[in-house]
């Protein structure tokens, strides 16, 4: 197996983590987004390092090489990405409703990743398909919460944070759809994509979902925060 994508992933994610922290806002009201966005590529770099050394990479009897580190990465990074988006939808409210939505969405998300891993490891083709579909059902639940109740709460509040949510949400949705597609056409699914091609495809998705998204989402949150602050300043002056 060509290990280059793992090495590239390690280097890109390490540098991105430092850059996202250095460039991110340190304003006490929104700095948690900076922490979220720099932690995500740091975790990914760790996972790419493990994959480079084939630590936790298994090839069960089904012949599909599965790097467990990839799923371990996703099971931690996707909840962090979702937490940032949920907090934005709820306009940065620290407690109460946020906790309930966070628990619900992270539960569905964790189920999505774990059942995806089970699908990749299963030898029985029927089980592989069943767990793939089960994972898609959990993914549908995540999308329902983001596009249904959370979108309407955010829209009800309106303002700059809602505009930021409505920019970050379609971006995240679009990139996340790439993962089940690659899985379906890769060695875990119909096998049109060779293992090396799949590793490159996932690296590209990871860089978009973790790094490009982080820069764009952080800029949107920062802009919304400044707009909110300027509006409050105008209200005080008026
Ligand atoms: C799997 C298995 C098949 C079905 C589905 C999947 C979805 C995976 C997703 C992963 C997102 C990962 C991200 C990582 C970046 O930090 C597990 C491939 C629905 C949506 C965004």
Image: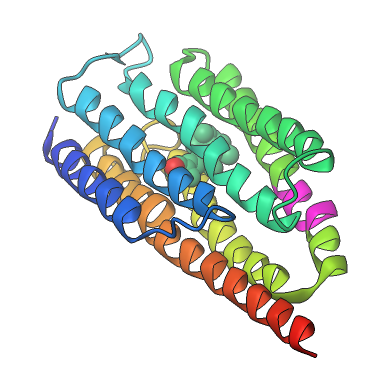
Classify 200 as above or below 216: above
Specify start and end residues of the magenta stretch as a single range: 143-150
Q: Quadrant of the C terminus?
A: bottom right
Classify 47 as above or below 201: above
Q: Is residue 140 left or right of residue 30?
A: right
Query: Can residue 24 be seen in this snapshot?
Result: yes
Q: Where in the figure is residue 155, as x and y percent of width and height? A: 82, 68
Of residues 99 and 59, the one nearer the viewer is 99
Q: Where in the figure is residue 22, as x and y percent of width and height? A: 29, 55
Name the residue at 72% across, 69% down.
162
Of residues 238 and 218, the one nearer the viewer is 238
Q: Is residue 92 left or right of residue 60?
A: right
Q: Quadrant of the N terminus?
A: top left
Q: Main secondary structure of the magenta part?
A: helix
Q: Where in the figure is residue 75, as x and y percent of width and height? A: 50, 28
Figure quadrant of residue 191 = top left
Number of numbered discs visible in the structure rendering = 0
Figure quadrant of residue 107 = top right
Q: Is residue 144 left or right of residue 182?
A: right
Query: Can residue 58 be seen in this snapshot?
Result: no
Figure quadrant of residue 40 = top left
Name the residue at 63% across, 52% down.
85
Q: Where in the figure is residue 176, as x and y percent of width and height? A: 52, 50
Classify 231 as above or below 40: below
Q: Given the current orientation, which residue lies at the most extreme front position?
A: 237
Name the residue at 45% across, 66% down.
216
Question: For residue 28: magenta?
Answer: no
Of residues 155 and 235, the one nearer the viewer is 235
């Amino acid at each position: 197996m060509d290990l280059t994508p793992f090495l590239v992933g390690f280097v890109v994610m390490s540098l991105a983590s430092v850059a996202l922290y250095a460039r991110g806002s340190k304003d006490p009201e929104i700095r948690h987004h900076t922490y979220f966005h720099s932690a995500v590529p740091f975790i990914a770099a760790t996972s790419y390092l493990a994959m480079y050394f084939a630590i936790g990479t298994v090839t069960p009897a089904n012949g599909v090489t599965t790097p467990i580190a990839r799923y371990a990465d996703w099971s931690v990074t996707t909840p962090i990405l979702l937490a940032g988006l949920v907090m934005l939808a709820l306009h940065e409210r620290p407690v109460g409703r946020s906790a309930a939505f966070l628990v619900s969405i992270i539960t569905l998300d964790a189920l999505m990743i774990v059942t995806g891993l089970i699908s990749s490891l299963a030898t029985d083709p029927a089980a592989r398909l069943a767990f793939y579909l089960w994972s898609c059902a959990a993914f549908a639940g995540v999308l329902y919460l983001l596009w249904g109740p959370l979108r309407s709460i955010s829209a009800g509040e309106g303002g700059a944070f809602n505009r930021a949510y409505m920019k970050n949400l379609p971006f995240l949705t679009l990139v996340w759809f790439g993962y089940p597609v690659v899985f379906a056409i890769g060695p875990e699914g119909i096998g049109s994509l060779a293992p090396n091609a799949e590793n490159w495809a996932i690296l590209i998705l990871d860089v978009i979902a973790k790094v490009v998204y982080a820069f764009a989402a952080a800029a949107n949150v920062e802009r919304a925060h400044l707009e909110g602050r300027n509006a409050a300043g105008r209200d005080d002056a008026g």
